[in-house]
Image: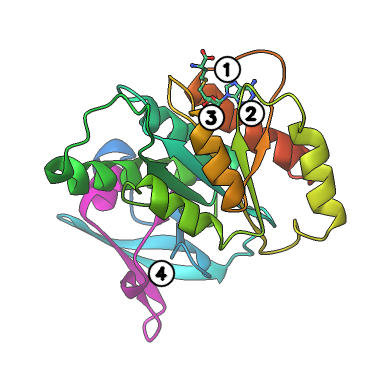
């Protein structure tokens, strides 16, 4: 069934209706060719998801009656933050789309020493907005209950600071020959760091990788450097592998 994330103010308690506006209304009317009586699911992206029946179709505005409240059970127990050094081209879009499908809770794009892309502060707001839209659409498609938050681009320092708020922080380093991801996950599990509401950050470097010094700084800030195996993954692959492995170990991938 078609799903839409709506801002909380489009849920009207007194009349037990929701209003669907803008792009979502356009999608529902023009793309889905919805008719009065059709049912869709609406979520406020926080704590409310309802089945609604369309009662009115106006230009750019759909009104629908709330039929029933739905349980919210598509979110993972652990909240995973993907910290991604800005990759080239439109790879960040792929990372946000796929990461949202798999179940990431938050995306933190950041700049590191070998980040290749030209960072343009002026275009930044627009780009973040586009990325947030990609997260919303992917969350709708994946039947998520929440839309992951896409943050504005962090500096390396800000990222290290932010990681201190997580229960576990891993930085993927292809030259790491000691610590592997699996034992790191199992250790965190045993220490009770991967329970309901726990926060985990997985940091991935750019095409050129992290410098040794960055790994040192990250470790000083509480990150653990981990290997994802003997093969070198592309930057857009690494985060997905890390996320999937973590969810596999915590029983989020159908287990
Ligand atoms: N330029 C480097 C590879 C960088 S891969 C080289 O050619 O040696 C891009 C990013 O993906 C890395 O910074 C790291 O965060 C992650 N990554 C890729 N393969 C990995 C692996 N086997 N283990 C851990 N991290 C990996």
* Front one among 207 and 123: 207
Closer mark to the observer between disc 4 and disc 1: 1
Contact check, label 2 and label 3, Cβ < 8 Å: no
The tag on residue 241 is 2
Can you tell which quarter of the image residue 7 is in? bottom left
Circle count: 4
Specify which label sits upstream in the sequence, 2 or 3.
3
- Where 170 falls versus 25 (above or below)? above
Contact check, label 4 and label 1, Cβ < 8 Å: no
Closer mark to the observer between disc 2 and disc 4: 2
Closer mark to the observer between disc 4 and disc 3: 3
Task: Give the residue at mark 1.
Answer: 233
Specify which label sits upstream in the sequence, 2 or 1.
1
Q: Give the CA separation, mark 3 to mark 1.
A: 18 Å
Task: Give the residue at mark 4.
Answer: 65
In the image, taking residue 180 as reference, residue 122 lies left or right, namely left
Identify the residue shown where x is 40% and y is 54%. 158
Contact check, label 2 and label 1, Cβ < 8 Å: yes
The tag on residue 212 is 3
Residue 195 belongs to the span the image colors magenta: no
């Amino acid at each position: 069934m078609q799903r839409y994330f709506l801002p909380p103010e489009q849920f009207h308690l007194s009349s037990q209706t929701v209003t669907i506006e803008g792009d979502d209304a356009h999608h529902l009317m023009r793309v889905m060719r919805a008719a009065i009586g059709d049912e869709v699911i609406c979520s406020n992206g926080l704590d409310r998801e309802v089945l609604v029946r369309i009662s009115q179709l106006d230009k750019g505005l759909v009104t629908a009656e709330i039929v029933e409240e739905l349980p919210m059970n598509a979110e993972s127990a652990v909240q995973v933050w993907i910290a991604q050094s800005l990759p080239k081209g439109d790879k960040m879009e792929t990372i946000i789309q796929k990461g949202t499908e798999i179940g990431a809770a938050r995306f933190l794009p950041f700049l590191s020493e070998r980040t290749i892309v030209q960072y343009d502060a002026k275009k930044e707001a627009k780009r973040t907005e586009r990325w947030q839209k990609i997260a919303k659409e992917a969350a709708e498609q994946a039947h998520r209950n929440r839309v992951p938050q896409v943050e504005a681009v962090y500096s390396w320092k800000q990222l290290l600071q932010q990681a201190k708020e997580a229960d576990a922080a891993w930085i993927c380093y292809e030259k790491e020959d000691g610590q592997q991801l699996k034992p790191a996950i199992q250790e965190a599990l045993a220490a009770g760091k991967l329970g309901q509401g726990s926060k985990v950050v997985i940091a991935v470097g750019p095409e050129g990788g992290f410098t040794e010094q960055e790994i040192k700084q990250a470790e000083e800030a509480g990150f653990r450097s981990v290997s994802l195996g003997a093969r070198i993954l592309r930057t857009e692959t690494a985060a997905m592998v890390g996320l999937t492995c973590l969810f596999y170990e915590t029983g989020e991938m159908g287990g």
